[in-house]
Image (cartoon, helix red, strand yellow):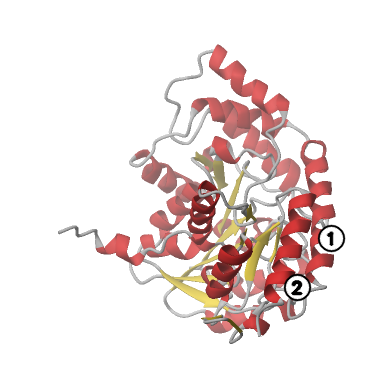
Amino acid sequence: MHKPSDRLNRLAESATLAMARMSRELKASGKDVIALSLGEPDFNTPEFIKKAGKDAINNNFTHYTPVAGLDDLRDSISNKFFRDNKLKYSKDQIVVSTGAKQSLANICLSLLNPGDEVLLPCPFWVSYSEIIKLAEGVPVKIPSSVDNNFKVSPEQIKNSITKNTRMFMFSSPCNPSGSVYTKNELEQIAEIFKKHPKIYIVSDEIYEHINFTNEHYSIGRIENIKDRVITVNGVSKGFAMTGWRVGFIGAPLWIAKACNKIQGQITSATCAIAQKATEEAMRSDPKKTTLKMKEKFLSRRDMLLKELNNIKGIKCNIPEGAFYIFPDISYYFGKKYGNTIIKDANDLCMYLLNNCYVALVSGEPFGNPECVRISYAASDDKLLEASKRIKNQLAQLN
């Protein structure tokens, strides 16, 4: 009899990866599936970064590196933090990991004890809650909706804090809503945490370079809380380097050392070749490197919003960053197609996948069960065709 651990049984499968798997299975059977489920830029890594990776191979950077990353890379990340974010992290306060997901896992495993609560403003990236559970913490969801641009208020945060609260974890720009917290909003949130010195703030800024407001502000800049902020970032989104698997943190020194210790017993350092490529990315001007990609995503956002807003029952905010739209589709709950009843967003996603071959992700694992996530990291033609299929298929529900 197979008996996995209780720890494994507590975890849900990644919703985004699950939908990607089902899409691949349908494609393999010959179906024309348009997959708008994964959070991956449909751009190639810039040539100068790829060249740095090739040079690393030719120069024999093929050996183990320090667990926290190569010194030169951590120096370049330190400079990036100050140049782009006005954050002062020394080389020793930086830990490079195998993607930002591992960075988040390191943080949770380093800081959480069983029963510690982590505040999650909804919507949140699907892996946050599962990583917290893996570390034996308790995710505490703070609700939001399309009506307030998927942002939580300081009052909501204040009312969610208990004696067991250990951490506040959020992303800006947000995956999946594209919402961006302004400097003023972050300062108001910081005022709450000034009164709670035992709570740590994890700021996931992986989408900072895909920000249509042109005003990315890091909460770690705020004086009275900066010694409790862990800034998480990486190269997957802004530099189209998803497969290189490099993420990193800037953190108080003792937390960086703790994450280094955890990582040293699990993966050790990430790939040396990827580290050298990332070093080159960190030294580049992000405005020049990412500008064309950001402009294209903005154009696609506007195009897809126009299409979705012409579909009855779909309610959208205007995403300010990332490359997703997170519409409220609850209008369709309770409607039928033959013997199929749409009870929730999961049902709606499966209905669309199986009938018009468009893959979306339910908003339930993001904390908003009334929504679906649509990635516009796809060509204009695919986005227009997907919109047409969705509109026609939804029209058949009654």
Q: Secondary structure at mark 1?
A: helix
* Residue 138, above or below 89: below
Q: State whether residue 196 appears in this view.
A: no
Residue 154 figure quarter: bottom right
The residue indicated by pointer 1 is: 302
Q: Pick out the residue farthest to the left.
A: 1
Instruction: Please give the name of the residue rendered at 76% of the width and 72% of the height, measured from the top-left corner.
Output: 317
Instruction: Please give the name of the residue rendered at 58% of the width and 63% of the height, measured from the top-left corner.
Output: 353
Residue 196's disc number: none
Residue 69 in percent (x, y) is at 50, 33
Residue 363 in percent (x, y) is at 58, 70
The residue indicated by pointer 2 is: 316
Q: State whether residue 34 appears in this view.
A: yes
311 or 231: nearer the viewer = 311
The amino acid pointed to by label 2 is Cys
For label 1, the crowd category at 10 Å Cα-Cα, with few meaning under 14, some 14 to 19 and many 20 or more, is few
Residue 12 in percent (x, y) is at 41, 64
Residue 398 in percent (x, y) is at 66, 85
Are circles 1 and 2 on residues that touch, CB within 8 Å? Answer: no
Q: Secondary structure at mark 2?
A: loop
Looking at the image, residue 262 sits to the left or right of residue 213; the answer is left
Q: How far, Cα to Cα, is label 1 from label 2?
A: 12 Å
Q: How many marks?
A: 2
Residue 388 figure quarter: bottom right
Quarter the N terminus occupies: bottom left
Looking at the image, residue 33 sits to the left or right of residue 301; the answer is left
Residue 144 figure quarter: bottom right
- Work out whether mark 1 precedes mark 2 in sequence or the reverse, and give the earlier one: 1
Looking at the image, residue 16 sits to the left or right of residue 130; the answer is right
The amino acid pointed to by label 1 is Asp
* Residue 283, above or below 362: above
